[in-house]
Image: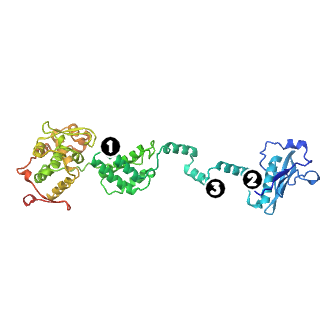
Amino acid sequence: MGSSGKSAEVDTISSAMEAPGDKMATTHADPNQSVLCPPTPKRGKHGKPAATARFGSASVPIYRCDSGGRIRFAISHYRDGKRLRQFFTTLEAANKEGLFVAQRIQAGRQHVTDLKPHERDDYAKALQLLAGSGIPLVAAVENYTRARSLADGEPLTTLVGDYRRHFQPLTRRTAVQEVVDELVAARQQDGASKSYVSQLRTVLNRFADAFPGEILDLSSSDVDAWLRGLDVSAGSRNSMLLCVKVLFSFARERNYLPAERMTAAEQIKKVKVKNDDVAVFTPKEMTQILHAAPAHLVPILAIGAFSGIRMAELNRLDWSAVDLERGPIELRASQAKTASRRIIPITDNLRAWIEPLPRKGRVVRHSLLHREVTALARALKLEWPRNVLRHSFISYRIAKVKSADQVALEAGNSAAIIFKHYRELATEADADAWFGILPKPGQWDNTFDWDRRARVVTLPASDGE
């Protein structure tokens, strides 16, 4: 039975065992469990044991005893210098334990085990279940107990089923930077605008630098903490959150994230932006800026002030969409922020400002022109609040037409927002003055010095006074 080559055997029961004894030994008790008997077992005839379990040179006698009219079988052996006795309801159970004790005696390891018979059976069964897995029993037990503590009372099979349902479809675990690169490449291939792709690349590369690990490991608290750590305005923070949401949605489409769960970015809400500080230019201030502007800055200033087009939309606008004969500016769905086509009327004073200009190609030839515009305002000692041209147009336009619905259609906004934040910011007289701003004599001869590196405009002495 062991590697030593010694054979294990059990001597047959002695002649002292009577036939009725076998029947009496069959009880409803577990045959593998030891039972309590009188302290002194009765031996067979001539003092011989009922049977003997042998392994090599080691032997363990098995005795028969009577307990309350039932036959029991006992083994007796020494462990750590102490005599031990165990009782069983069947000869087979006593033989099994006797063989085990004989093996331990032969191997000189009797002192190292205190396992009961049923515990050894459990141990053997555990090893059988782990056979072929390559996992040691101790490691398996450690993993199981750890999993039970993390499960918080939930059945492990249920948790494993949920995990397989959510995570098995995943293609692979992917780093954040890799997903960013794939997203940018996909949007370029899909024909997204250069400005949109540039925004995605800038924001998401910054996000990937903060999280070099796998996108699957990110939580909503990670994303929220990153956003809160940025030194940006509420509007900019919402814009960056939108880019991150695009990234996580793209990762889910690629099966890098579970399909049936909200992404970490989707769980974060936008920050409420205060709109009670809407700033506008007065007609006098707008006149001062336009009358000092050279021709190449007029499109930004005039179209922004008298049509309300967003600066991002203006950057995508082509002169072919400005129809001076029919009257409107057509903003296509691909150019508008709201992804819906918009028709914007050309006011009389806006026509006067753009009609003398060459109208081919992009309206804003270069994004750096916006820096010249703000530098011009600083040279005139004027502040340039965020979205001031659009805010000014909406405020004066609703004072002029007195219809939030009409202004909402022209500005690409909701009537509720128009009515809530822009109503009664200007009078009708102010609106007439605003939409009455016209080019001055010699307007198209305006010049100034522009220090691109320092971002400073120096006006001619007569204009700068």
Q: Secondary structure beneath disc 2?
A: loop
Residue where numbered disc 3 is placed: 138
The residue positioned 39% from the left and 45% from the top of the image is: 250
Q: Position of residue 124 (x, y in %)?
A: 70, 50
Q: Nearer the viewer, mark 2 or mark 1?
A: 1
Q: Position of residue 40 (x, y in %)?
A: 87, 54
The residue positioned 22% from the left and 37% from the top of the image is: 405
Q: Residues within 10 Å of mark 2 (few under 14, many from 20)?
A: few
Residue where numbered disc 2 is placed: 116
The first of marks 2 and 1 along the sequence is 2
Q: Secondary structure beneath disc 3?
A: helix
Using the image, tell me which numbered label, if any, was put on residue 162. Answer: none
Q: Residues within 10 Å of mark 3 (few under 14, many from 20)?
A: few
Q: Residues within 10 Å of mark 1 (few under 14, many from 20)?
A: few
Q: Nearer the viewer, mark 3 or mark 2?
A: 3
Classify 188 as above or below 112. above
| Residue 95 seen from this side | yes
The first of marks 3 and 2 along the sequence is 2
What's the amino acid at mark 3? Val
Relative side of 192 to 370, left or right? right
Could you give the CA–CA distance between mark 2 and mark 1, rounded to whole angstroms? 71 Å
Relative side of 117 to 374, left or right? right
Query: In the image shown, does 266 or 140 lie closer to the viewer?
Result: 140
Q: Do the CB atoms of the residues marked 1 and 3 lie less than 8 Å apart?
A: no
Q: Secondary structure beneath disc 1?
A: loop
Relative side of 169 to 243, left or right? right
Classify 273 as above or below 408. below
Residue where numbered disc 1 is placed: 190
